[in-house]
């Protein structure tokens, strides 16, 4: 995908100049997967802010869930009085044993509703099929996709209710390419973050925001990720993380698998 917004660099008379961009969400919004040479993360936030010529206020933190965004990030976002806000959150909720669609809906509705009521152009994201990015057992795949489908349906309803915008990662060009993902296959790589930034820029342009310049999709400025980094992540972070999340998701996955088996066998 090449983000070449029509009129980028030349604001239309009715376009909203984005002076402050707020980024909400979890570790993807933090920038995990796009490391900087001196340490820390960059991610789609700074890339998008540069395209908008805006000041970035990134309120995200790793491990955040939808309720965290409502309780801890939203009040600070409203105080920043942003012209635009982008959000990637919900994946951590789908992986937990206490997954609650009603609570998710109420939290997302409050976040999007209060921001749009304050005059902020809001863009959130709906998730892709993780089974096309990394291989997982069929039972886990069924369970995860059922929850992601519920989350996406909630996102669709909330976005439509408040007139917000949504970036659909399932149809984002390049989203299923291998180089769009970091070693953990859950967070975007530098290229993946650039694709996200370009996609968000297009949605904000549709919402009437001025986009000063296209997002450059050429990788530059990030740290070089080597096979040694991949191996280190797998041992130190990957296996422990999979073990923790598996304990949460496996019981639900078993019930979903049994339901699916009964349906296919006609029981």
Image (cartoon, rainbow, N blue to C red):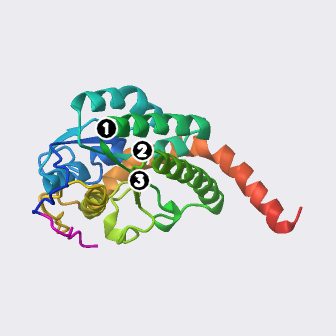
Crowding near pointer 1: few (<14 within 10 Å), some, many (20+)?
A: many
Cα distance in 3D space between marks 3 and 1: 15 Å
User: Between disc 2 and disc 3, whose residue precedes?
Assistant: 2
The answer to whether marks 1 and 2 mark residues whose Cβ atoms lie closer than 8 Å is yes
Q: Secondary structure at mark 1?
A: loop
**In this orientation, which residue lies closer to the viewer: 145 or 234?**
145
What is the residue that sits farthest to the right in this orientation? Answer: 267
Question: How many numbered marks, from 0 up?
Answer: 3
User: Which residue is painted at 18% across and 63% down in the image?
Assistant: 215
Q: Earlier in the sequence, mark 3 or mark 1?
A: 1
Mark 3: which secondary structure? strand
Q: Which quadrant would the C terminus be assigned to in this image? A: bottom right
What residue is drawn where x is 43% and y is 68%?
Answer: 171
Residue 156 in view = yes
The residue wearing badge 2 is 89
Percent of width and height locating residue 108: 47, 39
Q: Quadrant of the N terminus?
A: bottom left
Could one spot residue 64 in this view of the protein?
no
Seen at 54% across and 45% down, the residue is 94
Q: Is residue 207 above or below residue 29?
A: below
User: Is 80 placed above or below 46 here?
Assistant: above
Q: Which residue is mark 3?
A: 125
Position in image of residue 233 (x %, y %):
34, 51
């Amino acid at each position: 995908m090449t983000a070449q917004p029509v009129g980028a660099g030349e604001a239309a008379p009715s376009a909203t100049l984005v002076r402050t961009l707020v980024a909400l969400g979890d570790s993807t919004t933090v920038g995990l997967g796009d490391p900087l040479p001196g340490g820390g993360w960059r991610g789609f936030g700074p890339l998008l802010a540069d395209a908008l010529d805006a000041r970035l206020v990134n309120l995200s933190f790793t491990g955040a869930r939808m309720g965290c965004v409502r309780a801890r990030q939203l009040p600070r976002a409203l105080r920043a009085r942003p012209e635009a806000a982008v959000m990637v959150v919900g994946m951590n909720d789908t992986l937990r044993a206490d997954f609650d669609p009603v609570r998710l809906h109420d939290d997302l509705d409050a976040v999007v509703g209060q921001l749009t009521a304050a005059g902020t152009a809001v863009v959130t994201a709906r998730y892709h099929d993780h089974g096309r990015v990394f291989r997982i057992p069929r039972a886990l795949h069924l369970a995860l996709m059922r929850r992601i489908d519920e989350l996406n349906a909630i996102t669709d309803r909330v976005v439509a209710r408040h007139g917000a915008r949504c970036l659909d990662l399932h149809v984002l060009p390049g989203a299923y390419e291998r180089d769009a993902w970091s070693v953990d296959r859950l967070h975007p790589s530098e290229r993946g973050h650039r694709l996200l930034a370009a996609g968000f820029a297009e949605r904000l342009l549709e919402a009437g925001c001025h986009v000063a310049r296209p997002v450059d999709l050429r990788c530059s400025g990030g740290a070089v990720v080597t096979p040694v980094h991949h191996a280190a992540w797998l041992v130190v972070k990957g296996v422990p993380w999979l073990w923790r999340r598996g304990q949460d998701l496996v019981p639900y996955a078993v019930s979903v698998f049994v339901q699916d088996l009964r349906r296919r066998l006609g029981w």
